Amino acid sequence: MKISLVGVGRVGGATAFALVARAIPHELVLVGRSRERTLGDAHDLLHAAALVRPIRVKAGDLEDSAGSDIVLLAASASPEAGGGRLAHAGANARLLREIVPPLAAASPGAVFVVLTNPVDVCTYVALRASGLPPGRVLGTGTLIDTARFRALLSRDTGINAQDIRAYILGEHGESQFPALSVASAGGVRFSPGDVTVRSFAEEARQGGDQVKRFKGYTNYAVALSAAIICEAVANDARTVLPVSSLVDGFQGVHDVCLSLPSVVGRGGVERVLSVDLDDEEAELFRRSAGVLHDVLDQIR
Amino acid sequence: MKISLVGVGRVGGATAFALVARAIPHELVLVGRSRERTLGDAHDLLHAAALVRPIRVKAGDLEDSAGSDIVLLAASASPEAGGGRLAHAGANARLLREIVPPLAAASPGAVFVVLTNPVDVCTYVALRASGLPPGRVLGTGTLIDTARFRALLSRDTGINAQDIRAYILGEHGESQFPALSVASAGGVRFSPGDVTVRSFAEEARQGGDQVKRFKGYTNYAVALSAAIICEAVANDARTVLPVSSLVDGFQGVHDVCLSLPSVVGRGGVERVLSVDLDDEEAELFRRSAGVLHDVLDQIR
Amino acid sequence: MKISLVGVGRVGGATAFALVARAIPHELVLVGRSRERTLGDAHDLLHAAALVRPIRVKAGDLEDSAGSDIVLLAASASPEAGGGRLAHAGANARLLREIVPPLAAASPGAVFVVLTNPVDVCTYVALRASGLPPGRVLGTGTLIDTARFRALLSRDTGINAQDIRAYILGEHGESQFPALSVASAGGVRFSPGDVTVRSFAEEARQGGDQVKRFKGYTNYAVALSAAIICEAVANDARTVLPVSSLVDGFQGVHDVCLSLPSVVGRGGVERVLSVDLDDEEAELFRRSAGVLHDVLDQIR
Amino acid sequence: MKISLVGVGRVGGATAFALVARAIPHELVLVGRSRERTLGDAHDLLHAAALVRPIRVKAGDLEDSAGSDIVLLAASASPEAGGGRLAHAGANARLLREIVPPLAAASPGAVFVVLTNPVDVCTYVALRASGLPPGRVLGTGTLIDTARFRALLSRDTGINAQDIRAYILGEHGESQFPALSVASAGGVRFSPGDVTVRSFAEEARQGGDQVKRFKGYTNYAVALSAAIICEAVANDARTVLPVSSLVDGFQGVHDVCLSLPSVVGRGGVERVLSVDLDDEEAELFRRSAGVLHDVLDQIR
């Protein structure tokens, strides 16, 4: 299992450390902007790996990523480039359009996992820039929102979070929504109208922004999400994760990436599940897609 | 984590081995009918444990089980005692009524897990003989039928079995039924009328009988079920497992043990979930309870 | 990871169960003498696997083992064939000479692990019958004696058994010996003359016989040893295990299989280590080899 | 398992993330200098934990650490305080003398693990400030140097690093030394005069400095070391780790903390092993102790 990680800032660094701490890859290539800094992280992680597994960690260039099983994209244009969210999205899209083609050429068999924000937009851009089949490019999407939602429901019900089957779907952002009509635990449905449940979904939605207000950015949760996705790919687990990937036809939505429950295995997204949304949720899903289409149109 | 296992025949022996192979207890006490044979198993398992974890394994008497965290009941009256299934149920009930009171007195804080067949009948008898609160006595129930059902659905759908949320409920026996109205995977419901799904439930139901026809008994699957339950208790996992425990009020059913999705943690069954059965399933559940009431009446 | 297991009696059955309980293979083929019985075990294990990992378990013939990564040999001629230990060794050697060539032809890339007793003799016979390179055929050897020895030292010193670096070497039988001159824990040497340490080695040596006296045979410890070896192979762990394999030159010993510390990885025994024995131990090693040569000469 | 972490900068943050990624504690209290920043990390880690285990993560004050099983000390006086290494040591010593007494009062049963540099000096200061028994205060010491050394030997020999029994002892700093006279793998001794082995020890010694040259500080390796120590404590593993703790009598060294192979379990350092050093190594050990005594004298 060779994993390459492009972008070794706060998110990328934490992701690399999560991969080492959980002993996921056999080989880990870090591709960072600053050669010195990346060499420092690579050596530090190599020493850390010595405690758990003999992972070959090295700093490298795009070419060193050749033959990867997984390529993680955590690179980000510097926000100081100016402008608001949209300008940032445009800058990151440009960055991905530049680096993804050579990465895909070097690792034509790899699964690409996008962490760069706005993640749904960047996943779409990376997919189109890669020329790869849709399932091979996916974004961390609402995996972390879903985990947070389940954790809150788990604490409230006293039931293990693994047994809480509830998903946050759509955009990893403002327009996301909980698919309450299919949420259940142990064969007991959660009531879509339950105010506590709705307040948990709201709390999950605001989780990232709250962290940003406190420390200026988020990195640990998204880094561990990416590591969990890598484990599913490495073990060909075919486990169901709400990740962002191409939606083309479901509920009338076309040509955009956003999160639906997806079977994740060695081939990336092996299958996007046609979740049984009710009418209100289907409308929220289409609205979420609309938001993303708008951004994509503007940065084209 | 001290576990005592009473009954070290084919099922008990395999259970003890599963506990050691998965390194679950710190101390394991085997209480068997034949002192010599049990000493042999205890020493053999002690040597096996040396490969994975320093478990103190010993052969002992009922008194040596004192202070256990979990007591596994795998004892069985010899079937040669004659008679059919009912006679066997009666003999095992008599055996449990004899050994459970001193075991419960010796380990008043333990969770009791019943493997002895017929498991629902024996769970009820053990519960009443123990004088313990309902959640502290549970039987392996339909856990293995459910696992088999999920494995078949998993193979058919290409989705990890952990993500297949489908339960076989009621009696671990002929009257069991799949709760198809609440079965789903990744937010997609299984259709209750789907013939393939129904055939898998039927295949799961017949799984044990098929093994019995081939080799005369079953032991590996039920042994591993018991080990999985012990892990949930040891880790206080509060995971949802379909196990047999007292039902008193759900769907009009009273005073009988059978399987419903249950939250299993350090205290045993922490909570029995009021699964959203449809009318047909509720009727099957009551019928299953009726079958067990009949047996319990006959062996009183 | 496809594993085939030939011989599904008490040892083979426990081995198959250990493989399932520890979720080691993806595919497990059982080749047993009785078709019915083996089908029963295969189905029972398939149901057990449903609880932990989707392992494809099936009953099969020698041909079904084709393409295995590991072939476990637990077959044994029935002891009722008469005669003492030597007759039994001869009968098992004849059995292996018959079944190993087609197995090796069907899985030319497999690692063969021998459990059949006398294990050193049978490992040698299997190696020669296979035509495979020496490292690809190994026997469970003194792995279990070593684990037992370490467990006793661990209990006595209060140090984790993984940190007790002490080996029992030579024959898995009467002539085995502890390599005390290289035994240590955390940089502290055990004194070769220490009577407690010597008594533990003696206790380890007699462990198997004691179990046999109590229950007539051993199975759990050797089954878990084989599972541990399979894990080392499956993970290409290159961990050091005292297993039986061809010795040809070390300490003047040639053309016999017995246990030395060996690096076990995907290719089987990747390397036999030239352990630093003192003169007395080297003599015990040669004596152990002599015992095995005698048996091999007699059964030729 | 309640763990409190005092100091949430680069090292502390990475340590907290390692604890979450490896799912070690049930409760994690972060005590940081900046309330806002620490709240941000706590929320981010809480979201991350939702992916693997329901850990209660919160930002708190010293009082919130009450009743901890483990207290991790990663706090550091800001280096801008001026002066060289010695001034930094003095500043950190003053900081620890201030915060350790209330922490020890709040968690009198806790194991204290020191990460703050210079780690041996700070471990000694923390021990004396705590008033706790010697084994209950330990520092990460040469654990990471040892892991690095073993990783290099492992790569060179093709033997799993777990089987490489070689220790770097003494100060976590310039005066450390490899205990080559007791280094072995699988019963084969490494030759103390071997230039390759010596070059690996030298490479391990310089590992940290190299990382510092590249990125200005080290954090990942020391963070994972601390997590590994926490696992040994949480599981009462009684595993042998080279960690820094009070040495009082060994080889004529008194009243100083530095690394020797130590049995680490629920009670912290359960036992410091009297490793069989040769004369040259014993002299290096005394010299290392002398270096630390000098620093301690100067900062008193």
Image (spheres, coloured by chain):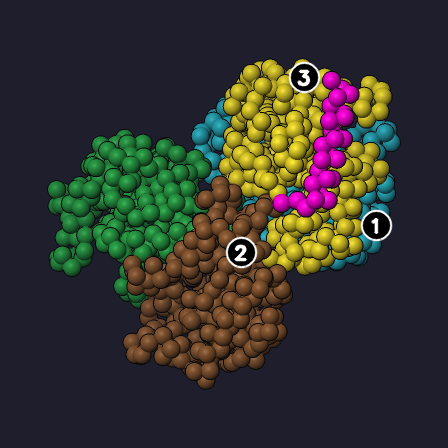
Chain colours: A green, B cyan, C yellow, D brown
Q: Which mark is in front, 2 or 3?
A: 2
**Residue B222, relative to residue B195: is it above or below?**
below
Same chain letter for marks 1 and 2:
no
What crowding class fits label 3: few (fewer than 14 Cα within 10 Å), some (14-19), or many (20 or more)? some
Position of residue A239 measured from the top left corner of the image (x, y, whole percent): 43, 38
Let me know if marks 2 and 3 both belong to one chain. Answer: no
For badge 2, the amino acid type reads Leu
B105 vs B229, left or right, is right
Mark 3: amino acid: Arg
Residue B262 shows up from this direction: no
- Give x and y (percent) for residue C176: 74, 39
The CA distance from mark 2 to mark 3 is 47 Å
The one nearer the camera, C152 or C20, is C152
Q: Which residue is mark 2?
A: D180
Badge 1 element: loop
C292 drawn magenta: yes
Location of the C terminus of chain A by quadrant is: top left
Report helix, strand or loop for mark 3: helix
- Residue segment shown in magenta: C276-300
Q: Chain of mark 1?
A: B
Q: Quadrant of residue B204?
A: top right
A139 w.r.t. D224: above or below = above
On residue B61, which mark appears? 1
Please tell me which residue is depicted at 45% across the width and 67% down the height of the picture: D175
Residue under mark 3: which chain is it in?
Answer: C
Amino acid on which the number 1 mark rests in the picture: Asp
Crowding around mark 2 (Cα neighbors within 10 Å: few <14, some 14 to 19, many 20+) is many
CA gap, disc 1 and disc 2 = 50 Å
Which residue occupies the extreme bottom position in the image? D300
The residue shown at (77%, 26%) is C294
Q: Is residue D289 magenta?
A: no
